[in-house]
Amino acid sequence: MLKLFALMGRRKEVVIFMVAVGLSGWMLSLETDDKLRVAHSVSAAIFEMGQRGFAWAIHLLNVKEENEELHHRVAELALENSLLKEAELQNDRLRQLLEFARESQFALRAAEVIGWEPDRTVNSILINVGRSEGIVKNMPVISPEGLVGKVYRVMSRVSVVQLLQDPNCRVSAIVQRSRILGIVEWERGIQCLLRHIPVKGDVQRGDVVVTSGMGGIFPKGLVIGSIIDITGEDWELFKGAIIQPGVDVSHLEEVFVLTNEDRTKPSPDDHSAASSVNTR
C-alpha cells in the first residue's frame, strides 16, 4: 500500500488525468436528469465551500479587529491605572507635607523640585519659587525627613538650592543624645561626615545628628541624619562620624523653604490683643 501511495505521488499528473477521464466517462453514461442532479450537487458543494471560506476570512478579520480593540483598551486601562496610582501617591505625599507644615514651628514656603542645576558648579537642585515669593539667599530648605540644604542663588521665580551633599556646604551640628558638637561636611556619595569630635566624645552608631543653631543660617534642631560609623584612632585628638542623611535627595519632589519668620514668636496683633486685655 505504501508503495502504491508513493507511486501515485510520483505520477500525480497521470493519476489526475485518469481520474478526470473516469469522471468524464461516468458523466457521459448518466441520463440528463442525473447529470443535472450531479452538476447541482457539485455546484452546491463548491458554493458552500466558497461561502465557508469567505465566512472564515470575515471571521478572522473580525477577530483581528476585536483583538486590536482589546489591546487598545488594555493600554488605556494600564495608563489610567498608572495615573490613578500616581495621583494616590501624590495625595499621600501632599497630605504628609500639609501635616508637617501645620505642626512646624517655622513659617514654611512650599516648593516643587523642578530639576537639577544645569551648570553643576554646585551639587544642587532647582525649585519653583524665587524672589517673587520672598525667597532670599541662604534660607534653609527642608523636607519632613530633615535638612536638604540652603538657597544658593535666587531668580525671579526659580531658586538654586545647595544640597547638604555639596563639598562646599558645612553645617554646625550637635549629637542629639550626648550634645557633642561638630561640623557636618560632605564625605562621599550621599553620606556626610561629622568632624572635630573630641576623641573621648560620646558618640555611637544610631545617634541622631541635628543642626546646632550656630552659624546664623540653620535654626537649631533640624534633623541631618544618623551616625552609621565612627572614624579615627584613639591617639588622635579628634575623631569623625559617618552620617547617613535623613533626606534621600534622589527622590525629592517637594520641599519647604524656611522663611525668617518664627511661628513661635507672637505677632504684633498678638501684642496688641494682650495689651488691650491688660488695660481692661
Image: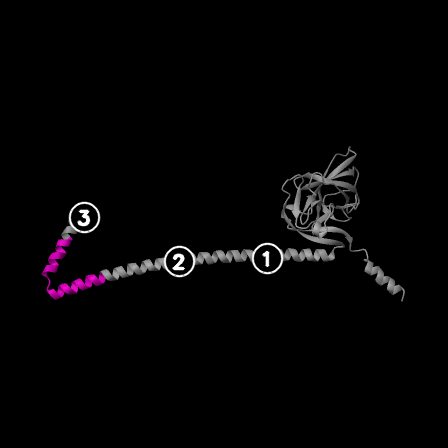
Q: Quadrant of residue 229?
A: top right
Q: Quadrant of residue 215?
A: top right
* Amino acid identity at mark 2: Glu
User: Taken as a whole, is the magenta stretch helix, strand or loop?
Assistant: helix
| Farthest-out residue, right | 279
* Amino acid identity at mark 1: Ala
Cα separation, mark 3 vs mark 1, equals 71 Å
CB contact under 8 Å: marks 2 and 3: no
Region in magenta: 19-45
- Which residue: 64% across, 55% down? 93
Q: Position of residue 153 (x, y in %)?
A: 70, 44
> Is 8 in the magenta?
no
Residue assigned mark 1? 87
- Tell me the mark number nearer the camera, choosing from 2 and 3: 2
| Chain-order first, disc 3 or disc 1 | 3
Q: Position of residue 87 (x, y in %)?
A: 59, 57
Q: Please tell me whether mark 3 sits on a helix, a strand or a loop.
A: helix
Please give the label number shown on residue 65.
Answer: 2
Residue assigned mark 3? 12
> Is 25 in the magenta?
yes
- Which residue: 15% across, 64% down? 36
Q: Position of residue 39 (x, y in %)?
A: 17, 62
Cα separation, mark 2 vs mark 1, equals 33 Å
CB contact under 8 Å: marks 3 and 1: no
